Amino acid sequence: MAEAQPEKTRRSSWIGPIIAGVMFIAVTGGLIYAMNTLGTERLQQIVRDAGPLAPVAYILLRAATYVFAPLTTGPIQIASGALFGVWEGIALSVIGETLGGSINFWIGRRFGRPVALRLAGEEGLKKAEVYYQLVTDWRGLAVARLVLFAIWDFLSYVIGFTPAKFVHYLLVSLIVGAIPTAAAVFLGSQLGGGNQVLLAAGLIVLCIVLSLPILFSGRIQRWMEARRATKDGS
């Protein structure tokens, strides 16, 4: 019985990424179908006709997917590239992500883990808490924002638990966060384009990259602990 529990834990650790991957592929596939059926230009015209309401609605939606962290966020970010164009899509996505992440930060700081747990879910928050020691200063924040962008929504709650300064969190979110966001938005700008093979390959690679921090969180935690032990011993 003692060996069954670790095996069960390992199996359960794969469930979240698999479900997230299936949702990502399904929603993104729906977006591609909509682009091909309705036409990218027609959808972009609808966005333009909506005026300022469209970018404001997108920013609020992007922020909401951060606060309610279990929501599927990738396809929404990708869609911005197709609907708003590359540069506007990047700007709107970064603003929405920073707004939502900042809300998470202050929820974590003011109300602590019980409230964050209700919004983020137990499994997601536990995965993010593995990196608690990493995100206590601006250097760790920068590394986490670039490498662990797939779970930055969950990490934003955890960062609020740490002594990290909000100004550091804000600057890292705006500056470093623009790098992975730009890659996703640029990929989204290719929706409805002619090179569907390249687009499909890019989406598969993105889906795999999104899953890595979750799948290998245990190994990364052990690596971080080994580095801390080496540093303390020197």
Image (cartoon, helix red, strand yellow):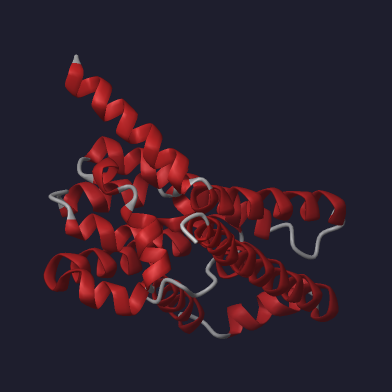
Answer with the quarter of the image where residue 67 lies.
bottom left
User: Going by the image, does 199 lie left or right of 78?
Assistant: right
Q: Is residue 95 visible?
A: no
Question: As rendered, which of 28 and 175 lies closer to the eye?
Answer: 28
User: Could you tell me residue 181's position as x and y percent?
Assistant: 51, 53
At x 84% / y 79%, what residue is drawn?
A: 37
At x 34% / y 78%, what residue is drawn?
A: 119
User: Could you tell me residue 111's position as x and y percent?
Assistant: 15, 73
Question: As rendered, which of 18 and 96 lies closer to the eye?
Answer: 18
In the rendered image, the vertical position of residue 163 relative to residue 65, given as above or below: above
Question: As rendered, which of 200 and 211 lies closer to the eye?
Answer: 211
User: Could you tell me residue 212's position as x and y percent?
Assistant: 56, 48
In the rendered image, the vertical position of residue 59 relative to residue 105, given as above or below: below
Count of numbered badges drawn on the protein: 0
What is the residue that sits farthest to the top in this orientation? 234
Answer with the quarter of the image where residue 20 lies.
bottom right
Q: Is residue 155 visible?
A: yes
User: Going by the image, does 41 lie left or right of 55?
Assistant: right
At x 73% / y 53%, what residue is drawn?
A: 204
At x 26% / y 21%, what residue is drawn?
A: 230
What is the residue that sits farthest to the front in this orientation? 1
User: Going by the image, does 231 lie left or right of 50?
Assistant: left
User: Could you tell me residue 113's position as x and y percent?
Assistant: 22, 69
In the rendered image, the vertical position of residue 40 relative to residue 191, given as above or below: below
In which quadrant of the rendered image does the C terminus lie?
Answer: top left
